[in-house]
């Protein structure tokens, strides 16, 4: 990056006149009047000294003029020995953006001083040649040239533009070595540079190395640096320390302090600063605007309006602060009123003003107003500003008008603005338009743009395709985009796709983990059937000193619920109590759920009674009551919610329907169905599915169909539940018809769906259809059959009397058959009296599950039916030796 110029010499050109022989004359100059001093018919000889002393001539500073001046001075033998002319001409070359000519002129100066060098470094900076600026400074050091505070200030400006912390530290060391560190100008420049390149710790160290008690400028620079690096607490600490010393704040200090108060919402401290503003500089527009911004960000709009009214001549920043505050206060119409007043008064309107008023309209009820603002933006030409375009895309996206977001994007110069492309990808993802998001992502890559980590996170958030997710993972690795946010999105994507191993691998490779990472991984384990690993990971989190928040604890409580670990759940409850986060709705409902599933309904009720009632906690308690047969208690909680006019959601209603399903009170289910119809939740997939389950349990397949038909866009779970209902009622043909209809509607079956449809084939004796479905699992959907699928197939063969075929099927299974498979075959042998096969199946079951009394009894019954009493006696003796006892039958009648 750096270009060291030490190979060059200040004295490399020994014959300046021959090198700079410019065959030009003043007489040939188009603007010769500036040299001759022509005024009407009067003419005066050109005086270079007077010319350079007259600052008004700087408006003629062009490369052509500088070269003519150079030629004139060479003809008069004023160069290179006249120091004043050399520096003046050098300055003209730098201003005319010709650093090549400036460097050539500089090399002709016999004894250049620090002022000449500073002109060169400053010129490089002015022309954005920051590497050359640093290289020139290194050359001065190499030749042990004299430096001054202006030199340091100029080269620090280059380091700031280069964003080079290491180079800044080198200058810091050099300033200490040469004694310039005590210079206020150098020290302030160092503080400012470190702050601007993101090394505030170094800036703070420079500030503390030497006392700045009497230098308000140093204080303001370090306070401004802390504000720029979002160290708001340090800003307040510094101003307190400043006020306690000899140096008092000035008009430049107050805006920074007020901005920090606004960020931290420290309204009381901000009011104290406001009092000082009123006392010392009541007409300072910048400080008064900062007061308006403070009240706006703290949600005190009445006070913001009052503070705004006291500003003598509010500028565009003042108006925009008030307008932005209205938007943050969710008062879009007041924001529009402020904007309208600005237009009437002819106040300047900038891009920040426009983005603020657009953002204030980001809700569906203000769609018409947003369209009107859009029209004004088109008319006034602000659409060319990328920030305004981004605001329009974002506001339409939040309204759900993604087609309009796409229209704004297409009409903008998006080809040259990858940032807009990244925003559009995010908008597509937020509106569930994942295919379009992927298409735009691909288009950006084809055009040579590089989507950023924000786009990657947006894509991964809705990703359910493992292959595509892996490709995006590769892209993120290749481009160095795997930070904390992308890493969290990656292992969430792998978890969602059911690949917990890959998810955990990404998690382990992350060098830095925050609470979001820990929580995402713990939740992934909890939600995908690995609760033990979730609890283990939580213990690891605590051992590394991370502090879990409400979301983390809720995820661990979910794992405790799955394992019924009441003791660990109580420990987490104690931790929440100590951390004073036990009253939140999220962890409160998780605690109710944990205690309910662990069978401690009394504790669940105690936690519930201490919470502000919400749908999640109510649903958890209702579900807990239903799982333990306390349907009436659950219904009382449901009634309390209705009597309190509490807004019901689909989860609460589904929990209550689940409770009814576990009872025999069909009339209660009908009443709840009527209430659901009244509030309009019967179209929700989860509620409709619960109704189908309930009516199936009560034996009304017609009501099942009716409830299903009322679901708006039924999902896979709803279709599978209806198939299961037909299967349970022995309607195999109808179940297959529903399965076909489901596929026609674009719904792909999963493992559970195949279990239910194979069960229907089993109960209906549809063996060939069962074979076809089993083969299609892997062939058409990439789903590997599991034991429960094979059990259904064995059952179908057994019920049809095809016992030998069933035996061959079991022996040819690609996975090892378990006791359930052999037990199913044994039951079929008992039905058809196949003694030899029954003996084989029973032996397999006894080996796999020696304590299962059912296999012994089934074999004994088969043998008894054919009169082999000796073997029956042997079976019973074997049961006694093995300590297996048959459970006595019982009846609730």
Image: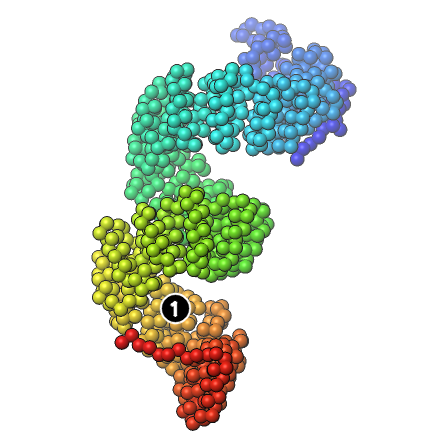
Quadrant, the C terminus: bottom left
The image shows a total of numbered marks equal to 1
For the residue pair 144 and 64, the one nearer the viewer reads as 144
Q: Is residue 496 left or right of residue 197?
A: left
Q: Secondary structure at mark 1?
A: helix
Residue 507 can be seen, yes or no: yes
Q: Residue at x 37, y 26 (%)?
A: 292
Q: Could you tell me which quadrant the N terminus lies in? A: top right
Residue 602, quarter of picture: bottom left
- Nearest the viewer among 800 and 54 is 800
Q: Residue at x 77, y 19 (%)?
A: 15
Does residue 380 appear in the picture of this structure? no
Question: Is 692 positioned to the left or the right of 754 in the image?
Answer: left
Percent across and percent down for residue 368 are 29, 41
Q: Mark 1 sits on what residue?
A: 743
In percent of width and height, residue 675 lies at 22, 58
Residue at 47% from the left image edge and 82% from the top image edge: 879
Q: Residue furthest right?
A: 14
Quarter of the rendering containing residue 767: bottom left
**Quarter of the figure with residue 658:** bottom left
Percent position (x, y) of residue 713?
A: 33, 61
């Amino acid at each position: 990056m750096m270009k060291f110029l030490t190979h060059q010499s200040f004295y490399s050109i020994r014959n300046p006149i021959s090198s700079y022989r410019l065959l030009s004359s003043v007489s040939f100059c188009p603007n010769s009047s500036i040299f001759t001093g022509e005024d009407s018919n009067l003419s005066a000889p050109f005086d270079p000294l007077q010319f350079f002393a007259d600052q008004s001539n700087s408006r003629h500073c062009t490369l052509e003029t500088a070269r003519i001046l150079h030629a004139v001075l060479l003809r008069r033998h004023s160069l290179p020995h006249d120091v004043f002319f050399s520096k003046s001409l050098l300055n003209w070359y730098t201003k005319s953006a010709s650093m090549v000519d400036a460097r050539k002129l500089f090399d002709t100066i016999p004894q250049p001083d620090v002022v000449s060098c500073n002109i060169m470094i400053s010129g490089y900076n002015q022309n954005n040649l920051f590497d050359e600026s640093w290289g020139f400074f290194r050359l001065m050091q190499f030749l042990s040239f004299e430096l001054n505070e202006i030199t340091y200030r100029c080269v620090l400006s280059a380091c700031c533009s280069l964003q080079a912390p290491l180079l800044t530290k080198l200058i810091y060391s050099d300033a200490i070595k040469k004694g310039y560190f005590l210079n206020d100008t150098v020290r302030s420049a160092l503080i400012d540079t470190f702050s601007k390149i993101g090394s505030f710790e170094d800036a703070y160290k420079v500030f503390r190395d030497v006392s700045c008690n009497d230098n308000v400028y140093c204080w303001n620079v370090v306070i401004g640096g802390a504000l720029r690096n979002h160290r708001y607490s340090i800003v307040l600490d510094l101003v307190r320390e400043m006020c306690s010393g000899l140096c008092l704040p000035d008009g430049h200090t107050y805006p920074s302090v007020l901005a920090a108060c606004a960020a931290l919402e420290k309204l009381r401290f901000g009011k104290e600063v406001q009092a000082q503003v009123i006392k010392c500089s009541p007409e300072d527009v910048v400080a008064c605007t900062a007061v308006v911004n403070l009240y706006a960000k703290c949600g005190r709009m009445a006070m913001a309006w009052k503070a705004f009214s006291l500003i003598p001549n509010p500028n565009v920043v003042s108006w925009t602060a008030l307008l932005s505050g209205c938007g943050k206060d969710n008062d879009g119409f007041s924001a529009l009123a402020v904007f309208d007043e600005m237009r009437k008064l002819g106040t300047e309107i900038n891009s920040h003003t426009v983005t603020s008023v657009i953002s204030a309209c980001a809700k569906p009820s203000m769609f018409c107003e947003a369209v009107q603002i859009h029209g004004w933006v088109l008319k006034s030409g602000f659409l060319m500003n990328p920030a305004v375009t981004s605001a329009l895309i974002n506001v339409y996206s939040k309204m759900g008008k993604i087609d309009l977001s796409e229209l704004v994007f297409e009409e903008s110069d998006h080809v040259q603005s990858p940032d807009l492309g990244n925003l559009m990808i995010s908008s597509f993802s937020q509106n569930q338009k994942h295919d379009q998001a992927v298409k735009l992502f691909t288009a950006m890559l084809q055009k040579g743009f590089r989507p950023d980590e924000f786009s990657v996170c947006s894509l991964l958030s809705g990703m359910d395709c493992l292959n595509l997710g892996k490709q995006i993972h590769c892209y993120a690795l290749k481009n160095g985009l795997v930070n904390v946010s992308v890493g969290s999105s990656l292992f969430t994507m792998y978890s969602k796709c059911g690949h917990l191993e890959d998810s955990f691998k990404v998690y382990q490779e992350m060098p830095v983990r925050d609470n979001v990472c820990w929580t995402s991984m713990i939740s992934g384990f909890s939600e995908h059937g690995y609760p033990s690993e979730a609890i283990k990971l939580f213990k690891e989190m605590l051992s590394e000193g991370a502090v879990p928040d409400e979301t983390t604890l809720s995820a661990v409580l979910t794992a405790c619920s799955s394992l019924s670990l009441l003791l660990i759940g109580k420990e987490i409850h104690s931790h929440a109590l100590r951390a004073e986060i036990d009253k939140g709705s999220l962890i409160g409902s998780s605690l109710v759920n944990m205690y309910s599933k662990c069978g401690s309904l009394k504790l669940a009720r105690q936690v519930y009674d201490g919470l502000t009632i919400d749908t999640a906690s109510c649903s958890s308690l209702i579900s807990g009551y239903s799982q333990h047969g306390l349907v009436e208690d659950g219904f009382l909680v449901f009634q309390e919610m209705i009597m309190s006019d509490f807004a019901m959601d689909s989860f609460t209603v589904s929990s209550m329907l689940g409770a009814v399903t576990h009872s025999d009170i069909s009339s209660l289910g009908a009443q709840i169905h009527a209430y659901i119809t009244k509030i309009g939740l019967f179209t929700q997939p989860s509620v409709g599915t619960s109704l189908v389950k309930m009516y199936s349990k009560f034996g009304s397949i017609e009501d099942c169909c009716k409830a299903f038909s009322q679901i708006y866009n039924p999902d896979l779970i709803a279709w599978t539940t209806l198939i299961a209902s037909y299967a349970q009622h022995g309607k195999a043909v109808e179940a297959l018809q529903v399965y076909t209809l489901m596929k026609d509607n674009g719904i792909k079956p999963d493992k559970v769906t195949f279990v239910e449809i194979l069960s229907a084939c089993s109960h209906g004796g549809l063996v060939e259809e069962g074979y076809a479905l089993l083969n299609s699992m892997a062939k058409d959907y990439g789903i590997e059959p599991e034991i429960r699928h094979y059990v259904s197939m064995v059952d179908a063969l057994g019920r049809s009397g095809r016992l030998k075929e069933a035996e061959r099927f079991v022996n040819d299974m690609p996975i090892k058959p378990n006791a359930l498979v052999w037990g199913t075959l044994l039951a079929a042998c008992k039905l058809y009296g196949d003694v030899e096969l029954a003996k084989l199946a029973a032996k397999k079951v006894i080996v796999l599950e020696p304590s299962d009394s059912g296999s012994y009894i089934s074999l004994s019954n088969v043998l008894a039916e054919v009169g082999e009493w000796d073997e029956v006696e042997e079976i019973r003796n074997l049961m006694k030796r093995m300590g297996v006892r048959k459970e006595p039958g019982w009846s609730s009648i």
